[in-house]
Amino acid sequence: MKIGLIGSGGREVAIARALLRGEPGAPLSVWAGHANPGLTALTGHITVGSAGDARAMASFFQQAGADLVVVGPEAPLMAGVVDLLRAVGIAAIGPTRYQAQLEGSKAFMRDLLQSRVPGASPQWALAADLPSAETFLRRVGQAAIKPVGLTGGKGVKVMGVHLDGLAAALEEVRQELDRSGQVLLEERLIGQEFSRIALVADGKIYGMPVAQDFKYARDGDTGGMTGGMGAYTCADGSLPFLQPADLRAADQILADVVAALEEESGTAYRGFLYGQFMATAEGVRVIEFNVRLGDPEGINEMLLLESNAPALLAEVASGRLPAPVFQPCATVVKYLVPQEYPEKSPVGISFRFDQTAVEAAGFTLLPASVEKDGDVWRTLGSRALALYGSGPDPASISARMEDFLARFEPPELRHRKDVGSAGVLADRTAQMERLRGGRSS
């Protein structure tokens, strides 16, 4: 099978590894935003181009004779690359341009939930002026303030976390209105977030192992919002603070959303659907949807996948959904980032990192926003490297990573030490037990 891949981050390196593990030596063609050294080590057929140029991408894969194309990031999906690929007879993993609005427009997403799955949403409002925003904020007390379009996981400000009081919140609203003319306001939910990513084919869904992402830049959920500083999964496919009813509710929401999207678009959904959920005392609520694998969560899940990835995804692209098989172990991913990230993301910081030592310690290194010249790495302005490990439980993996990074992490980079740590798991489980008041289901 000739395989195509779009994207150039750590997630795409994980996807490429899974694809080539399933079919060693298969021709792999990649359209990337930069020549990621983790991808160039796997294939020599990489073209660097714009993530928004859907026609050029479709032409590239047509010339490569690709049988199947897997789309990693969101921008090509919003640009309609899947529509164009399918129009020329190439199977593709990803939603159509219309369906991709679920991620590309938060207003579209909230409207769809309100009409089709109303109990899944927090209170929300789309405001175009300060008075209406203030009315909503006074009613709900605390809220998350979000740009309406794509933010790459950034740009969200939360009252009580980033913003101290109504005046600060209204100033953030004013700035967003000046930028885009609209702002999305959502009631602040109290609980624990979790990521449920499903494979979807013609109305059928299969939930992959649940992950918890760490969005804030620094330990203890402090600092600015990022694209994700790391994530962990557990060996049982759930998380210690979740109950079976939480996963049933999340999967039902995913299924209802797929049904709504397929009905409204008149087209089957074939690819990944990522639900970012919050477990609260009142039940599961939707934070947002992504129409592709998450990053970092996609790294955890693609490296756990035991099924033949090309065969599995080819089935999905044809509308069938065989049950995938995942290794029964826990995983941790930690991103190494420039010291000033995300407030500033300087380009061209040079550093050295011993990849041989990574492998000797039993971890996997996935380059992301970097380039490499000999043994010198250079940052390209975002999350630089992802470190992946697996084992019996997240806490032991995290502890081993910390021991390793204490000795080998380049001084130019930093990471969140608490991703998957024993303390975090205990604290978050205890918080949910307090919120639920001892209830179980």
Image (cartoon, grey):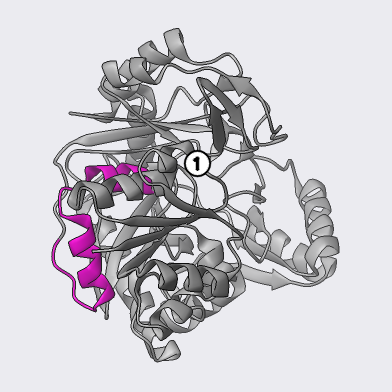
Q: Is 29 situated above or below 429?
A: below
Which quadrant is the C terminus positioned in?
bottom left
The relative height of residue 284 versus residue 116 in the rendered view (above or below) is above
Q: Residue furthest top?
A: 407
**Is disc 1 surrounded by few (<14), some (14 to 19) or many (20+) residues within 10 Å?**
many
Is residue 195 visible in this depiction of the protein? yes
Q: Using residue 427 as the reference point, say whether residue 389 is left or right of it.
A: left
User: Splitting the image into 4 quarters, where does residue 414 fall?
Assistant: top right
Q: Quadrant of residue 334?
A: top left
State the image coordinates of residue 128 (x, y, percent, origin top left): 79, 72
Seen at 48% across and 84% down, the residue is: 115
| Left or right relative to 246: residue 194 | right
| Residue 362 position in % (x across, y down) | 26, 21
Element under disc 1: loop
Majority secondary structure of the magenta segment?
helix
Relative to 122, residue 255 above or below: below
Residue 242: x %, y % from top left: 28, 47
Q: How many marks?
A: 1
Identify which residue, 84 or 264, lies in the foreground.
Answer: 84
Identified by mark 1, the residue type is Asn
Position in image of residue 176 (x %, y %): 78, 59
Q: Quadrant of the N terminus?
A: bottom left
Which residue is denoted by mark 1 in the rendering? 36
User: What range of the chain is rendered magenta?
Assistant: 298-323
- Rendered residue at 58%/42% (across/down): 226
Q: Nearer the viewer, residue 193 or 345?
A: 345
Q: Residue at point 36% right, 49% down?
A: 298
Q: Is residue 106 magenta?
A: no
